[in-house]
Image (cartoon, rainbow, N blue to C red):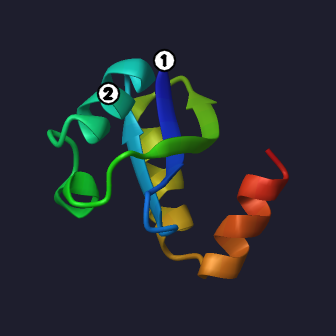
Amino acid sequence: MNYTYIVECSDGSLYCGWTNNIEKRILAHNEGRGAKYTRGRAPVKLVHLEQFETKEEAMSREFHIKRMSREEKLQLVKSS
């Protein structure tokens, strides 16, 4: 499985990414080995998760979420 996810960083900002192992990815973010953006903003908390069959679907969804406004992302999180 492949996943598109949103985490809330310790400063309240949101970060969106994709992975094929969500537990390992969240652990990496919290250990400072994740994305450059989250390195100084740990700990992160998983607030939204979507599951896809293919890597391409997950990456496409990530692209679309990253183009959303913060308010739209918060609505997505709220509906999770």
Q: Position of residue 9 (x, y in %)?
A: 44, 57
Residues packed near mark 2 inside 10 Å, few (<14), some (14 to 19) or many (20 plus):
some
The answer to which of 1 and 78 lies nearer the viewer is 78
Q: Quadrant of the C terminus?
A: top right
Percent coordinates x, y for residue 42 in the rendering: 32, 50
Identify the image quadrant of residue 22: top left
| Mark number, residue 1 | 1
Q: Residue at x 21, y 43 (%)?
A: 34
Q: Residue at x 81, y 56 (%)?
A: 78
Residue at position x 53%, y 65% from top? Answer: 64
- Give the Cα separation between the discs numbered 2 and 1: 18 Å
- Mark 1: give few (<14), some (14-19) or many (20+) Cα within 10 Å: few
Q: Which disc is residue 54 wearing?
A: none
Q: Amino acid at mark 2?
A: Leu
Callout 1 amino acid: Met
Which of these two is toward me, 2 or 56?
Answer: 2
Furthest-right residue in this view? 79
Residue that label 2 marks: 27
Mark closest to the chain's N terminus, 2 or 1 = 1
Task: Give residue 72's position: percent from left, percent from top.
Answer: 71, 74
Label 2 SS? helix
Do the CB atoms of the residues marked 2 and 1 lie less than 8 Å apart? Answer: no
Q: Secondary structure at mark 1?
A: loop
Q: x%, y% of residue 38?
A: 28, 56
In screen coordinates, is 24 left or right of 67? Answer: left
With respect to residue 44, does 31 lie above or below?
A: above
Q: Nearer the viewer, mark 2 or mark 1?
A: 2
Total numbered labels = 2
The vertical placement of 75 against 9, above or below, is below
Figure check: 57 above or below 7? above
Q: Residue at x 47, y 41 (%)?
A: 58
- The image quadrant that residue 56 belongs to is top left
